[in-house]
Amino acid sequence: MLSHIYSKENIFGRIAMYKIFNDFRIQVSAGFLLAISSSLCCVSPIVGVIGGFSGIASTFSWLEPYRSFLIILSMVIFSLLWYNLITKSKKSDLDCDCERSIFNRFFYSKIFLTFVTILSLFLFLFPNYSSILKSVNEVKGKLESEHLVVAEFVISGMTCVGCEYSVNTALVELTGVLKVTSDYKKGVTQIVYDKRKVGIQEFKDIIQNKVGYKVINIKGERKWK
């Protein structure tokens, strides 16, 4: 047992793993990947609707409960990286020419770390500044008719304003839809539409198959205004 633990191959393997995980670029990449993961549940619905990737929202919605943990872990990594940069008493490997090319030196530089840190902060705060999408949270189609009704869908999976935007944008494209409003906090989407041109089943298919959320309940048609 002990001979295996202290064998030459095992020791060299541990040293190699230490060097890999102690590499500046690996640490920065790990912090940035955690930042991306923390925002996928909010960013992916918008990307899915704009890019036409059906069901992408549900693919990453499971990350939402772990969002705070991912953010904290990423911030710890970036804090340690900056601490190491600031507290080094002598010229560090990050700033020396060593034998690296200009291209490689950039990825070991403070400029690169600054860029990645700022980008990560934007990802952390996405649910907050995604409120700029609120202006299109109530999407109006070009439709005037006396046959308008409203239906309410209870939806599971919406976690931020970006989710609301993805649902609204996908639904308003349907012919006959006048207005779509969503509230991710309540998990509700209301649709005003002409019942002669479009129906509840089509809305359900769009929400579940195109956007990727689950319809839990439908409060069906009632006269609008």
Image (cartoon, helix red, strand yellow):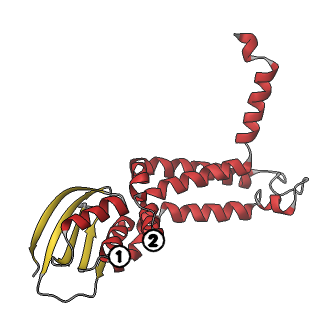
Where, by quadrant of the figure, is residue 110 drawn? bottom right
Could one spot residue 131 in this view of the protein?
A: yes
Q: Is residue 188 left or right of residue 159?
A: left
Checking the image for residue 50, the label placed there is 2
Between 114 and 138, the one nearer to me in the picture:
138
Please name the amino acid that badge 2 sits on. Answer: Ile
Placement of 16 over or under 170, stated as above or below: above
Q: Residue furthest right?
A: 99
- Judged left or right of residue 12, residue 50 is left
Q: Mark 1: which amino acid?
A: Lys
Q: Number of marks in the image? A: 2
Image position of 217 with respect to 178: above or below: above
Q: Quadrant of the N terminus?
A: top right
User: In this rendering, would 30 be left or right of 25?
Assistant: left
Secondary structure beneath label 2: helix
Location of residue 3 in the rendering, given as x and y in whole percent from the top left corner: 76, 11
Q: Nearer the viewer, mark 2 or mark 1?
A: 2
At label 1, counting other C-alpha atoms closer than 10 Å, the crowd grade (few under 14, some 14-19, many 20 or more) is some
Place of residue 38 in the rendered image (x, y in percent of width and height, measured from the top left): 48, 54
Residue drawn at 11 percent across, 87 percent down: 146
Using residue 154 as the reference point, say whether residue 78 is left or right of it: right
